[in-house]
Image (tube, rainbow, N blue to C red):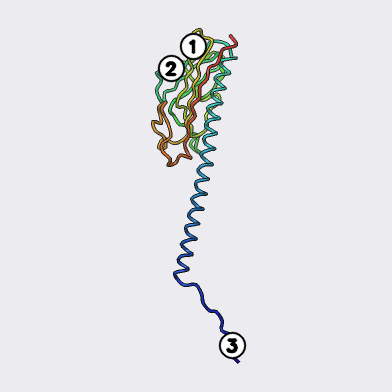
Amino acid sequence: MKRPKLNQRGFTIAELMIATLVFSVVLLLVTTGIIQIGRTYYKGINEANTQDTARTIMETVGQAVQFSGGTVGQTDPTEQAGVLKAFCVGNTQFSYRLGTQLVTASPGTGQSTSVLRENTVNNCNAASPPMSTGQELLSPKMRLSELVVMPAPGGVAFTIRVKVVYGDSDLLNNPTTSAAACKGSNGSQFCSDADISTTVYKRVN
């Protein structure tokens, strides 16, 4: 009695190589898509945080101008990066450094860099701004690129402009100036900037 012949034909090496190549291409496309989605996600988060921070600073300074009463100081148009400056709005003192990245204290070192602090004082003195007290208005890895508080004629309306930049210096063009901006696409998920301005009117004298 004859045994039935079994089909013993398998895959050839060429077929295995083609299948491996197709699988590798699919895996590469999927991996690239996941990486791009991750970059887009983190870029969106950083842009939203930077916008929120700039908006919070704008609202804080604007409300102080509108409702705190007293004299409203103005920022120095000739200020330099890294130099500690301040201006007063009533009894609220805003101390700031332009172009300096906010660095939080490392464990065990106690070293930190303050960038923009709001401080309530009895006698506001813009000539001696404190940076060890008050509330820091920026988040880590952010820097204040521009802060303008200028009165319009009549002293009732004030123009406020705030520019906040997020990212390390190697990801920015002109990191210490008001023209600070993100470089190209490389590392763009770790860099963002927000530039907003408004005009407020002083309601309380």
**In contact (CB < 8 Å): disc 1 and disc 2:** no
In the displayed structure, would residue 8 be above or below residue 56?
below
The quadrant holding residue 89 is top right
Q: Position of residue 162 (x, y in %)?
A: 49, 24
Q: Which quadrant: the C terminus?
A: top right
Q: Which quadrant: the N terminus?
A: bottom right
The quadrant holding residue 45 is top right
Circle 1 Cα neighbour tier, 10 Å, few/some/many (<14 / 14–19 / ≥20)? few
**Residue type, label 3:** Arg
Q: Residue at x 48, y 19 (%)?
A: 129
Q: Mark on residue 13?
A: none
Q: Which residue is mark 2?
A: 76
Q: Which residue is mark 1?
A: 152
Mark 2 falls on what kind of element?
A: loop
Q: Mark 3 against mark 1, which lies toward the viewer? A: 3
Q: Position of residue 153 (x, y in %)?
A: 48, 8
**Closest to the observer: 17 or 150?**
17
In this view, the residue farthest toward the top is: 154
